[in-house]
Amino acid sequence: MERNQNIEKRILWVAERLFLEKGFNGTSTTEIAKTVGCNQTLIHYYFRTKEKLFWDVFSPKVEQVLEYLDAPLDESIDFMERICNVVDFYFGMLELDERLAPFIVNELIMNPVRWGKFRDRYLRNESRSSAFDRFENMVEEEINSGRIRKIRPIDLLLNIMSLTISAFIVAPKGFAIGECDSNLRKSYLDDRREDIKNLIVNGIKL
Amino acid sequence: MERNQNIEKRILWVAERLFLEKGFNGTSTTEIAKTVGCNQTLIHYYFRTKEKLFWDVFSPKVEQVLEYLDAPLDESIDFMERICNVVDFYFGMLELDERLAPFIVNELIMNPVRWGKFRDRYLRNESRSSAFDRFENMVEEEINSGRIRKIRPIDLLLNIMSLTISAFIVAPKGFAIGECDSNLRKSYLDDRREDIKNLIVNGIKL
DNA sequence: GTCTATAAGGAGATAGAC
DNA sequence: GTCTATCTCCTTATAGAC
């Protein structure tokens, strides 16, 4: 990112980086400004509040992910394989940056106001991403055809997400072991990915 | 809790309640003092720092839970049932107060410094709770005897904890649905508890 | 658009009187 | 032990000059 780009974009870019690194509360507008190399008041000039800056950084990312979410659901593939693809999808996304999982947990899931806004925007009613409907229909069809055990589609998705996110939360901490190097982390996550696929698949098999 | 109790205990008691309700950062020492009905400086007189107050509140609770953790591992019971007991144990604990799961995630798991301190105190080496060793031995014995699939004991525990905690994180949010009343929440959690047991048990069956 | 200056409001912590 | 007074630091946000 060049120094000479317009300040608005540079603020967005720096904010994204710092929010991811230090969290929303851990990042002051003063620090963003200092990193950008501009005056702190400019952040308010362009984005009015820090919270609005957060959403201006965050929304485009969410929307991009929701678009990609369609691909793993390709109906020409075997159902169980599609489910594994969903696991791979989440793993792939969270692997892009190891600070992503903690960020999502802290700044989105655990913040009631933000979660409400997120849910209303992306999970409910009109604005709801079509990928969720496709996933639900696909699971219900398998249940009705007697090919998998009865499970609420949303719970299946919750199982996948819980296990995946927690793998990424726990990996850098080394759980009971302590911090470990990035190679060990990578191979741990690779193992976990396959374990989770097995667990999920065995859980819906008849 | 009587008004006339000594202030030190009342601070501990109020802090516990407020930390659980509003989180550590969301609770100021001033507010604790106001609720106790004492001067803000007294909190520093008794506990020196807010962080030390946190641990003075938190440690006894952790230690109590770790003691109880022995019971579900009773070796006279069938292994699969013991595993279900562990799930029940976590559910029972988190059901005591629905703010407990978010509290643990926010204040302990997601805070690197606190997590490090917690891990060093309760999960590692000398100070490690014996329940963890018992759990590990028990799982390894089943694997070696060829009665369950190969899995790292710590990963089995992680599966249980991830699924349980996330059930409690998600329940009050209603996930994609929105807030719901406490009866609905309760019956959702009861369903989830059985789903999770099935998932975990199917995941280790041969 | 960009700056200086500053408002306005917290927070946690300490000195020292009583 | 308990209080008043206060320090120090940091936050987001705004008014208004240039």
Image (tube, coloured by chain):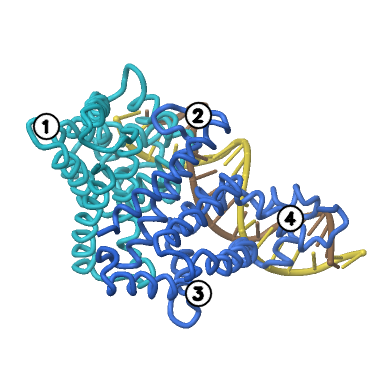
Chain colours: A blue, B cyan, C brown, D yellow
Residue for badge 1: B74
Which disc, if any, is residue A164? none
State yes or no: discs 3 and 4 in contact (Cβ < 8 Å): no
Which residue is label 4 attached to?
A40
Residue type highlighted by circle 3: Ser
Nearer the N terminus, badge 2 or badge 4?
4
- Which residue is denoted by mark 3 in the rendering? A129
Count the marks: how many?
4
Of helix, strand and loop, which one carries label 1? loop
Foreground disc of the pair 1, 4: 1
Which residue is more in the foreground, A122 or D14? A122
Amino acid type for the residue under numbered disc 2: Glu
Q: Do labels 2 and 4 share a chain?
A: yes
Image vertical order of residue B88 relative to residue A142, above or below:
above
**Same subunit: marks 1 and 3:** no
Is residue B178 shown to the viewer in this render? yes
For label 2, count other residues whose C-alpha is less than 10 Å away and answer few (under 14), some (14-19) or many (20+): some
Point 75% across, 48% down: residue = A34
Which residue is most to the top? Answer: B126
Q: Where's residue A118, x and y in %? A: 49, 68
Distance CA(mark 1)–CA(mark 2): 32 Å
State whether discs 1 and 4 lie on one chain. no
Residue at the outermost bottom position:
A126
Residue that carries the numbered disc 2 in the rendered image:
A179
Q: Looking at the picture, how far across and down is residue B9, in whole percent?
A: 24, 36
Q: Residue at x 17, y 34 (%)?
A: B68
Chain hosting mark 3 = A
Given the image, what chain letter belongs to the residue carrying mark 4? A
